[in-house]
Image (cartoon, helix red, strand yellow):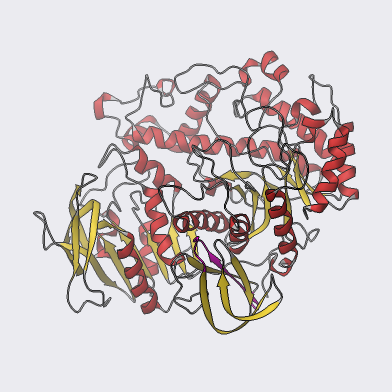
Amino acid sequence: MKKFKLFNQQVDYLLHGADYNPDQWLHSPEILAQDIELMKKANCNVVSLGIFAWAALEPFEGEFKFDWLDQVINNLASNGIKIILATPSGARPDWLAAKYPEVLRVNADRSKNLFGERHNHCYTSPVYRQKVAIINHKLAERYASNPAVIMWHVSNEYGGECHCELCQREFRTWLKNKYGDLETLNQAWWSTFWSHNYSDWENIESPAPQGMQSSHGLTLDWKRFVTQQTLDFYKNEIKPLRELNPDIPVTTNFMYRYDGLDYSKFADEVDVISWDSYPSWHSDHESDSYRGADVAFMHDYFRSLKDGKPFLLMESTPSKTNWQPVAKLKRPGMHQLSSLQAVAHGSDSVQYFQWRKGRGGFEKFHGAVVDHVGHENTRVFKDVKDLGADLKKLNKIVGTTVESEVAVIFDTENRWAINEASGPRQEKRNYVESCVKHYQAFWEKGISVDVIDQTKDFSKYKIVVAPMLYMLKDGTAERLKNFVKNGGTVVSTYWTGIVNETDLCFTGGFPGQLKDLFGIWSEELDVLYDDDRNKITFKSANELDITGEYEARVFCDLIHLQKATALAEYKSDFYAGRPALTVNNYGAGKAYYIASRNQKEFLADFYESLSKKLALKKNLDLKLPAGLTATTRTDGQNEYIFVMNFSEKKQQLNLKEEYLELLSGRKVKQLNFEAYSSFVLKN
């Protein structure tokens, strides 16, 4: 039996709660008393506390006020509500910005920010680091031994970058440590282009709109530096917390599709991954099924950061956001469905921003458990209460994981490099969306997937899918080849194997170091206009047993066969008849190359055929109707299968055997779905 421990055995149940901001209500003690009663009614057992409370904790420099926090923590603890206690560095008090202006960020255009907003601070600033260390030490000194505190919530949604002189100096030092001398740096950045050679370390500056923008090596290294500097700041934050009680785990909450940081670099430094999920359900331009696959992709990405260890859904909204272009309300059933989806993919919590709507400020119209009306007689409160009751029935799932035979490579540095490249198309390169669409083909079949970066171990998978693997990091090519030699299957696409880690093109043709793996070489990449179409046609008697034609858009790679076999060909244009899909036998395995960007129907049929050939395990051995998916969590002995309907239609599914349905407690052999509904099955 395999189970992970997230909270040092202090908690053995699913967490259900919200961000709680009592510092906004200190003038209304009756509200704070009401909050406790409402939390119990809503089946909440945890709160994230004090996330932006620095001004209330230290209203003036060196003057600390913890009495209010003592009382709040005692009240929560006495009512059985656990606490994830935050450090407040996400937004600093005004006295800190006024007395120490160096803590304020400098933008890429070298303008200096004024006091305001949040995360408007320099991660390099010694003063800011010192002040954060002091307040964090005070918090740890006072609360690190409190049994109600089960985790540290370090800062909030780290992000952004600073271009001040302090950061410029640190960046130059980082570059010196990486490259050693300027000749090596200039070669790595191809600085002879436009006479951009650097003759002195002091001449190097971060990218700027009025300065250097065309050196992609510089830009990539700056992004790496920003991640490293943020991570170093995080380590500075947690040092006093670790010193006073190393047994309390720490987390910091990550964000959906955020590309400002490489989260993989944080994985070893956080005890538990947590993230904030705010999907735009019920959109006018995409189906809820696609959005369900997209959110599942992110859940699996964050779970995979720590090799399957459960994560926490730190923030979600029980109703709507206030900042999306159109903040449509969740339709009936969607709150439970989207929350259980997180649990299905490895979360041991469902938590919200926020507990109670504030009366003012930017987020006064953001969704919350308790609305401005102030009582529990609302649809949203009932949804939250009912979900909390359901989560109590699933406590045996805590610590279990998702086991996958499939991995999709989604690599942040590769994403940076694709987005920075000047070509082959200025818009709609859509790396993330492409990864999601390949992932979706498995998700719709109820096949579990890990979402990993290219540095991870491939050996435990049957198939690794690497869409648009433009940047090959050192060692990736060899590891992919060894994986296939040993019997694995690799799938990749156009725009793969183009550059190295400093964005220098490989010589000798594309896909670079992977030419022999795929048995092809790419001569040209045709880039289509939005309304352009081509088609690919499967050859007769191909090994995938697929027939017919499929539409190709945006990218058409013009490749030559070396050792590979063509499975499909282009139908039109001057490259009609040239290979569009190939397979190459390599050792004991196979490598497939998809030369064009194809529609969903192609990916569905292609991966259906591969799934059968590889005997990939489905979470339910059934053909799932459109909109339905299934995900399994397991402890190695028991399997818990979440079957979810991401459509607005009523649906029926006949099972091959009888299961225990955990939410109802009934034995079932037929599932009757309402719109946006779900079941949790156990053999």
Answer whether residue 10 is magenta in the image.
no
Residue 611: x %, y % from top left: 39, 74
Question: Horizontal placement of 329 versus 259: left or right?
Answer: right
Q: Nearer the viewer, residue 282 or 98?
A: 282
Identify the image quadrant of residue 74: top right
Question: Horizontal placement of 270 versus 440: left or right?
Answer: right
Q: Residue furthest bottom?
A: 657
Answer whether residue 647 is magenta in the image.
yes
Task: Indicate whether 392 appears above or below 85.
Answer: below
Identify the image quadrant of residue 235: top right
Determine the residue positioned at 49% across, 79% down.
Answer: 621
Q: Is residue 247 visible?
A: no
Q: Nearer the viewer, residue 604 or 146?
A: 604
Q: Is residue 352 visible?
A: yes
Determine the residue positioned at 37% across, 21% down.
Answer: 211
Question: Horizontal placement of 70 versus 645: left or right?
Answer: right
Q: Which residues are magenta?
A: 636-650
Task: Indicate whether 581 appears above or below 244.
Answer: below
Residue 138: x %, y % from top left: 82, 33
Q: Nearer the viewer, residue 564 or 425?
A: 425
Q: Residue furthest left?
A: 574
Residue 670: x %, y % from top left: 57, 79
